[in-house]
Amino acid sequence: MDVLTDNFSLYAEGFLGTVRLTFFSSLLALALGFLMAAFRVAPVASLRAIGTTWVTVLRNTPLTLLFFAVLLGLPRFGLVLPFAVFAVIALGCYTSAFICEALRSGINTVPTGQGEAARSLGMNFGQTLSFVVLPQAFRTVIPPIGSTLIALAKNSAIAGAFSVTELLGTYKTLSELGYNIIWTFVWIAVGYLIITLSISALFNVLEKRYGVAR
């Protein structure tokens, strides 16, 4: 217990760092995921090609390699940002590919007649997708999106290796101070458990309220 009480501020800083990374990366992942899902089902071939390329490249790229590409590659093009922002970009883009595929699977469950009915009313593709298809698709993909964001929270641990303040990185300081490494990781695990259970609870509420009854 001394590991936690003696270093509560350090744990709190790392915990809040992970929460911030998870929150902002989730927002970026959801926004890009929705956009790429729209591209994947768009009637324009070039948009479908962009969506397919995005998903194929990011799903098959190790996250650590993507961190290196973002943190070391973007500054070469004159884009210099805090490491935490680069970490959000890497995590958000990587996770967006999985959000996209979850949404696309949900879109495929919506009967084609729904889209045809919307078009017969004069709606264009964007209106049909936004007001008819996606609201129905989202109801079916709440659980997989929740699981994807839980994975994002755990993947944020990689950011610690790139000088970003997050929970797992606290073990380095505590190890140097001579604290028991086992209890150090126990409290780190508790922190991640709090974050992932909170995300799980949120999506359980969303599923009960908006999910499709089975």
Image (cartoon, grey):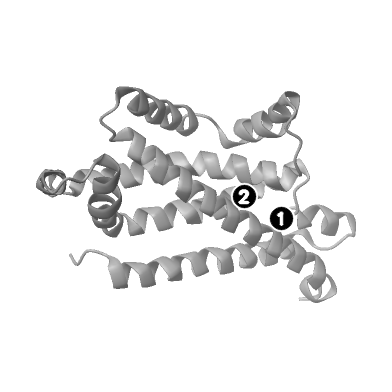
Quarter of the picture holding the C terminus: bottom left
Which residue appears farthest toward the front when viewing the image? 122
Residue 176 relative to residue 186: left or right: right
Res 106 seen here? no
Query: Taking 53 as reference, is 89 left or right?
Result: right
3D distance between C-alphas at marks 1 and 2: 8 Å
Observer-nearest of 137 and 164? 137
Residue 205 % position (x, y):
37, 72
Name the amino acid, label 1: Glu
Q: Report the amino acid beneath label 2.
A: Ser
Q: Residue at x 21, y 43 (%)?
A: 108
Which residue appears at 34% of the width and 46% of the height?
102
- The residue sitting at 52% across, 39% down in the picture is 94
Q: Position of residue 173 (x, y in %)?
A: 84, 56
The residue tagged 2 is 156
Residue 124: image location, x then y, percent: 24, 41
Q: The N terminus lies in which quarter of the figure?
A: bottom right
Question: Please, what secondary structure does the residue beneath circle 1 have?
Answer: loop
Residue 106 or residue 163, whichever sits in front = 106
Residue 42: x and y in percent read: 29, 33
Q: Nearer the viewer, residue 58 or 190?
A: 58
- The mark found on residue 80 in the picture is none
Task: State the residue at coordinates (29%, 51%).
Answer: 134
Identify the element where label 2 is drawn. Answer: helix
Sequence-earlier tag: 1 or 2:
2
> How many numbered marks appear?
2
Q: Compared with residue 78, is residue 206 higher up or lower down, i.e. above or below? A: below
Disc 1 vs disc 2: Cβ atoms closer than 8 Å? Answer: yes
Q: Which residue was labeled with disc 1?
A: 166
Q: Quadrant of residue 207?
A: bottom left
